[in-house]
Image (cartoon, grey):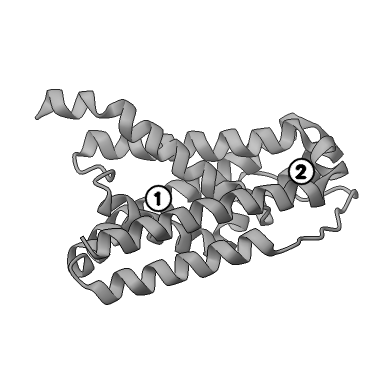
Amino acid sequence: MFLQAISNIPLYLATGIAASIIGALPFGLVNLSVLQSAVNKGIRSTLPVSTGASVVEIGYGMAGIFAGKFIWEYTHNNLWFHIISASILLATGVVFFIRKSKFEFNFNPTFGGFSYGVLLNLLSLQVLAYWIIAGSILSSAGLLPHAPATIVIFLTGIAMGKMGTLWAYAFFGKEIIGRSERISRNINRLVGVILMAVAAVVIVKGFM
């Protein structure tokens, strides 16, 4: 059992990183705050905000693990659950694919700090919803960890994915702001395609 858990470390680490990146890519409160802080005060100033947001992301990931397992355990044999889940994912994917975003960036001094990052991510309840849905999908694919050690590895991957994405936003801050509409549109399309692909997998699994 121990050796099996060790051998699964790369899988759970990669799964946590990938799921976290997908959730963190679209523009939101945290991303925009990191962008503005990077432009106003420099890249290093984004570290406390990014760390605070990543801590909350770990909590959301924990909620996703337990909620996802619970949802999948009690609904995986229910065809209507698959149909409704696939419909929600498909609709959300289409919305992401076609929507256009416009942003007004504030170049005045912004708030910052660890607690500010925590607060911003706590206010982003759609992130919690994302992790609950992601947990259910990962559970259906057998990609959610069970042993304490692999759960820690999975959560570490979540933190790495969140921090990495936010640091990418900070590092390329000026370029992203200069082409924010185009970049946002491409990110939304990518997320939309991923969600629609997941919807197809969910509905296929429902009929298997």
- Residue 160 horizontal side relative to residue 100, left or right: left
Q: Where, by quadrant of the figure, is residue 152 drawn? A: top left
Identify the secondary structure beneath mark 2. Answer: helix
Looking at marks 1 and 2 on the same chain, the residue that comes earlier in the sequence is marked by 2
Q: Nearer the viewer, residue 152 or 27?
A: 27
x, y percentage for residue 16? 40, 39
Residue beneath disc 1: 61
Q: Horizontally, is 175 left or right of 135 in the view?
A: right
What residue lies at 35% left-to-right and 38% top-to-bottom? 154
Q: Position of residue 8 (x, y in %)?
A: 24, 29
Name the image quarter holding residue 94.
Answer: bottom right
Q: Is residue 116 visible?
A: no
The Cα atoms of the two marked residues, 1 and 2, are separated by 24 Å
Q: Residue at x 86, y 40 (%)?
A: 40
Tell me which residue sits at (80%, 45%) in the image. Answer: 36
**140 sits left or right of 30 in the view:** left
- 135 displayed left or right of 185: left
Furthest residue toward left: 1
Name the disc covering residue 15, or none: none
Q: Which residue is mark 2?
A: 35
Q: Position of residue 188 (x, y in %)?
A: 65, 54
Q: Amino acid at mark 1?
A: Gly
Q: Residues within 10 Å of mark 1 (few under 14, many from 20)?
A: many
The C terminus: image quadrant: bottom left
